[in-house]
Amino acid sequence: MEVGKLLPFLGGRLVKAVVVVLAIVVCNFFLVHAAPGDPASVMAGQSGAADPLFLEQLRRQFGLDQPLHVQLWLYLKAVVMLDLGFSHRQQAAVATLIWERLPATLLLTGAAFSFAVVAGVTLGALAAQRVGRWADSVITVLALTFYATPLFWVGLMLVLVFSVWLEWLPSFGMSSVGADLTGMAAVLDVGQHLLLPALTLGLFYMAVYARLTRATMLEVQDQDFVKTARAKGVPEGRITRAHVLRNALLPVITFAGIQAGQLIGGSILVETVFAWPGIGRLAFEALLARDYAVLLGVFFCTSVIVVLFNLMTDLLYALIDPRVEVGG
């Protein structure tokens, strides 16, 4: 990849990314403010005072007494300065709240994504090598089952089996309460709490990657260059690894890059089921409390993450497939 082609590509994509993020910020602003309910009344109720003077003071303090277009303009100026506002409910800056919760979400989604890609590609390759046999049928049925099963049901069943019946794994939280563990003991404790939610979130995407890998490998196996390699006497294992699987991974990488950002949104349900202290659960709590500042802050951060993942996917695709010209 030539530097002369890479720099214009990155510059153009970054400009598009900024435009996309700003458009998402505007859309999220109007969607959140279109929800029924008065946030000032909710904040007053949480404070234990609901007299008209206090409500008016809250509206002035948070700019809720301004017209909607004025609120949007003030919010956009604050976002440009990376000021995501203040949460009246939690009495803390929104950026601080998100920064505290973001590592937990990235840990969960990273573990789920790694499991989904590795397990999905492995099972898909195994099914393609044994197409029409019992192993192919079992993998296909499992993939369709996990794809069609709701995430919350999978999570509840895993808790019922591994936490309630077998008592092997903890059912909620990120660490043992009051254990005060350090070093490797703390890492293992977090790993035990991570296993069930990561498995729940990753099973759905694993099914997608397994089906996609199987289909693309079967398609590549019929290509002329694979037949030529077999005619030259290349070992079958080398053909599968170097020719079939490598070319079959290109659409998988593209799809995985797109879904990597979507995992952040999918983690909301999983974090709620397992009481995982991430930004998904923070967004759910903010929604119930009509905490507009926190909701908009979470939406902004997740939008930036999704756009960055898509940009990295484009770069990775161009690195893996030399036929792709990033300057085009």
Image: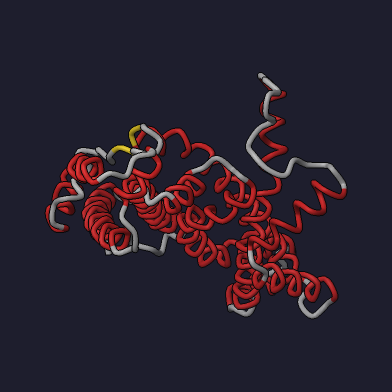
In the image, residue 267 above or below residue 223 = above
Residue 138 x %, y %: 81, 72
Tell which residue pokes out farthest to the front in this image: 51
User: What residue is drawn where x is 69% and y is 63%?
Assistant: 153
Q: Is residue 304 visible?
A: no
Quarter placement of the C terminus: bottom left
Using the image as rendered, state which of residue 22 and residue 138 is in the foreground: 22
Instruction: Answer left or right for 255 relative to 125.
Output: left
User: What residue is drawn where x is 65% and y is 73%?
Assistant: 148
Q: How is the image coloured?
A: secondary structure
Q: Is residue 310 visible?
A: yes
Residue 276 quadrant: top right
Residue 104 x %, y %: 54, 39
Tell which residue pokes out farthest to the right in this image: 166
Residue 205 x %, y %: 60, 62
Using the image as rendered, state which of residue 236 and residue 35 is in the foreground: 35
User: What residue is drawn where x is 36% and y is 32%?
Assistant: 92
Residue 37 quadrant: bottom left
All told, the count of numbered labels is 0
Using the image as rendered, state which of residue 69 and residue 27 is in the foreground: 69
Residue 125 x %, y %: 70, 65
